Image: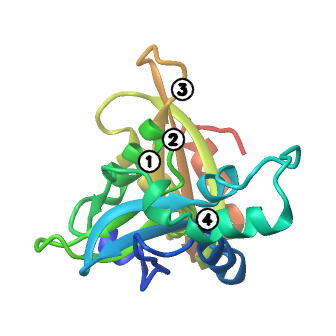
Amino acid sequence: MLVRDWMTRGPVTVTPDTPVMEALKLINERRVRRLPVLQGGKLVGITTRKDLKDAMPSKATTLSVWELNYLLSKLTVEEIMGRPVITAHEDEYMEDAALRMQEHKFGGLPVLNDRGEMTGIITTSDVIRAFTSILGMNEGGQRLTLDMPDVPGSLEKAAHAVHPSNIISVATYDVDGSGGNRRFVLRVGGEGLEGVRERVKAAGIAVLD
């Protein structure tokens, strides 16, 4: 699962000399939270809705409306944008990009290709879309949560018990960090769905839901 398969292509961008007021208007009109900053086709920075709003004068300012408008007309994205930019690569694994977003507490990363050109942006929404697709949320069927020993052959045992139903997706995680049991989340479809839980229980597997 590569970033290129889930990223948002053609993101809204600005240049360093874009006035802050124009960038904020663009963010509101296009309903985005961040704007990559390009200069000569190259990524040189990024600015967010928060950056732009923080650049606005305080309501407690003593400046006149004329003075405010003048100052804001001179303030450009280059003066407030973040740099260097944390990015993703279009050919890296989706989970690696998601982990980088989590580590840096970013809601999105510009995506570059081998030539250093920005080809898209990966956002929290894209990560959620990929997550729900992997779990087969749009494919119907039934969801089973199984508690099984963390030993080789556990998943094979579950697969035999599920038959003749088909496993659409599998996710697994450590229950308590002890390494004793693992939680398996299966989505199954096809034949025999009405009795799948009973078949799995009859195989000696704990079905949590």
Residue that carries the numbered disc 2 in the rendered image: 105
The percent coordinates of residue 99 (x first, y second) are: 39, 44
**Residue that carries the numbered disc 4 in the rendered image:** 33
At a point 62% along the width and 78% down the height, the residue shown is 22
Q: Which residue is mark 1?
A: 101
Residue kind at label 3, given as amino acid type: Val
Mark 4 or mark 3: name the one nearer the start of the chain.
Answer: 4
Amino acid type of the residue tagged 4 in the rendering: Arg
* Mark 1 closeness class: few <14, some 14–19, many ≥20 residues within 10 Å: many
Look at discs 4 and 2 and give the one toward the viewer: 4
What secondary structure is marked by label 1? helix
Q: Nearer the viewer, residue 168 or 129?
A: 129
Disc with the residue nearer the chain's start (4 vs 2): 4
Whether residue 115 is visible, yes or no, is yes
**What residue is at 47 percent from the left and 50 percent from the top?**
171
Task: Looking at the image, tell me whether mark 2 or mark 3 is earlier in sequence order.
Answer: 2
Q: Residues within 10 Å of mark 2 (few under 14, many from 20)?
A: few
Quarter of the image with the N terminus in it: bottom left
Mark sitting on residue 175: 3
In the foreground, 105 or 208? 105
- Occupied quadrant, residue 117: bottom left
